[in-house]
Image: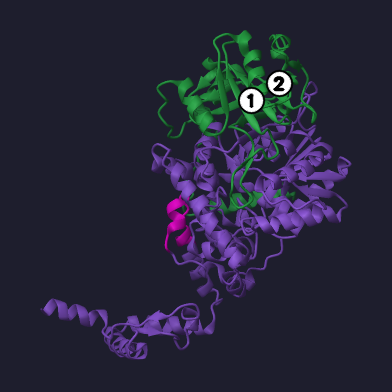
Amino acid sequence: MQNKAIDFKRQVNIKLADTKLQDALSRLQTRFVEGRSAVISEIHHLEDTRTAAAAIRDCVLNDLDSWLQKFEQQAIAHGAIVHWAETATDANRIVTEIAAQHNVLTAVKSKSMVSEECGLNDALEHAGIKVMETDLGEYILQLAHEAPSHIVAPVVHKNKEEISDLFAEKHQMSRKTGIAELCLEAREILRPAFLNADMGISGANFLIAETGSVLIVTNEGNGRLVTTLPRVHVAITGIEKVVPTLEDVTTLLRLLPRSATGQSITNYVSVLTGNKDAKAHDGPEHFHIILLDNGRSSLIGGEMQEMLRCIRCGACMNHCPVYQNIGGHAYGWVYPGPMGSILTPLLSGLKSSPDLPNASTFCGACAAVCPVKIPLPDLLRNLRTRQMALGLKSRQEVLMLKVWGWLTLHPRIYALATKIGVRILAMMGGERHLLHTLPGATGWTDGRDFPAPSGKTFREMYRKKSTK
Amino acid sequence: MSARDNILSKIREARSSAPQNVPAAPIANYLALHQRGPSPPPPDDLVTGFKKRAIKLSSDVLETSVRMEVPALLAHYLEERKLPLRGVCWTSLVGLPWGAAGLEMLPNPATNQDMVGVTGAFCAIAETGTLMMLSGAETPASTSLLPETHVAVLDPLRIVATMEDAWDLLRLEYKQPPRAVNFISGPSRTADIEQTVTLGAHGPYRVLVILAPP
């Protein structure tokens, strides 16, 4: 997928003014935020479980090369074929080669963010292979030629009416208005696609080293159909997804669906190991697993390694006041919200996504809900420091920070400057104590008035109080 | 160098220069422990616990103490909902008196035309109300997937407390997992349109668990 993160600030203004999007985003808050809070407390020893989950992820990341080799060895022993891809382009080439090798003309896909990262659909279409997304949300997006705006609920930005119009136009059928009718229409159109496809493409929520298995969580059942019916199954995922044992993955499964959609478990959890044997009626004859690096290995051993713990639940974006107001598209790439504001710069360059590390109020809600305890605000702050060190900040911002830094090191001058400053601002605030515009910082006042200071600094008030 | 070697050597180099790098415990030792994470206390009664959770996730649950009564229970369930009275079942269930209950159950893997699929289950998990299914020549995965109604005949003594217990049972009875282990918790569903839950997405519209002794 093309990275448009450079356009963030312009997109933010568009998204804030989009009333349909704002409605859709308020739904996300009620369903996902309240949904999570209703079931997360079902977990006995929640904090211990989060700590254990983080430790499981760290254990693998601290020894990732060994765990990857263990996984590979077990997967091959059970009949899977393991491929390694350094870049998105390599991954696309490998899938295209697998398709050619097995004479694949049509493919069905279940939702995979890694494949979005690679732009896999375009690459396959280019090679003459017809690809159909089968997750309802992804299917809608494919029809509309749009990108996902959420990693769990990809079509959260669209309302029912828009989907009704889209289906009526693309399916050439009568316009349905009920959500159940729309789901049924998609089911009836997609069922033949599952039955006739040569290849199924899925992601992987986890790779289990102990057994060489790929684990997939789904609700719709499309993940099961994609990995059961076609004669070839390709699972494409990131190298960081390895988990040691079936017990470890169980601990993570207690947290993942609860954090993501407020479900105690997803409808389906499929643990797939190897290809079908000669006696079996169903299952793929060929099982390929593609392990994608695409920049992930550069995070190992460094101060950003904790980001690789991420299990893609989306809780950080659901709880983020910035995401809640602008949605996922403004972030410009596959991964939005706090995790995306860190991953996008790390995987595709800080230079091309200068606003993302700053798209946070540091309120800490993301870290508070993260099931694997990623210190997201710390990592964002770290990226801001890097931006400063690399000279990626605007001259105005650098100058402002320098002046501020100098002032704070000179307390007497600081006191004087703030004394004058608050008095001017108080005067400007007038009787209503509100500033309609702040010279040089209009971004603060474009959407709202700025409350004017009382006219006295904190130090002045403190001194007055303590001398009483 | 291959992509594999490049990726692995990049990780190795990064790890060796990392300040927090600690010598990892040997992988074989870690794997052998099968260390469990924090898990909930088991319910007072596994069957009651399973039923409660399964119903909460929109499965239907029926019970009988006589295995031969399973077909009659199913016939009643299907008639009540005006559903087709024919379908496919796993070969292990072909001996039940389906015909006497007015049902036609063929011991075939499911195709797209089959509206009812009857399976057994390897075991079930009380913590989440979940069925655990193992794929195999006699236990095709498609029977619980393609039909609109999935019926699972479950021995109540095969209900365990947690998924960890289910893995232990799998290790005890089989050396390794089969091609597909499918955990099923109710009918397929989607909430992709306006985050509104709709039952029956790409898989079954309804899941009926019939608890019956073997």
Viewer-proximal residue among A444 and A415: A444
**Which residue shows up at 73% across the image and 29% down it?**
B147
Q: What element does badge 2 sit on?
A: loop
Q: Are marks 1 and 2 on the same chain?
A: yes
Q: Circle 1 is placed at which residue position? A: B133
Was residue A367 drawn as part of the magenta stretch in this picture?
yes
Looking at the picture, how far across and down is residue A35, in whole percent? 49, 47
Contact between marks 1 and 2 (CB within 8 A): the answer is: yes
Vertical placement of residue A343 versus A439, above or below? above
Vertical placement of residue A437 versus A143, above or below? below
Which chain comes out green in the rendered image? B
The N terminus of chain A lies in quadrant: bottom right
Distance from disc 1 to disc 2, alpha carbons, whole Å, reads 8 Å
Q: Is residue A409 visible?
A: yes
Looking at the picture, how far across and down is residue A66, in whole percent? 60, 41
Which chain comes out purple in the rendered image? A
Q: Which mark is residue A43?
A: none
Q: Circle 2 is placed at which residue position? A: B139
Q: Is residue B29 visible?
A: no
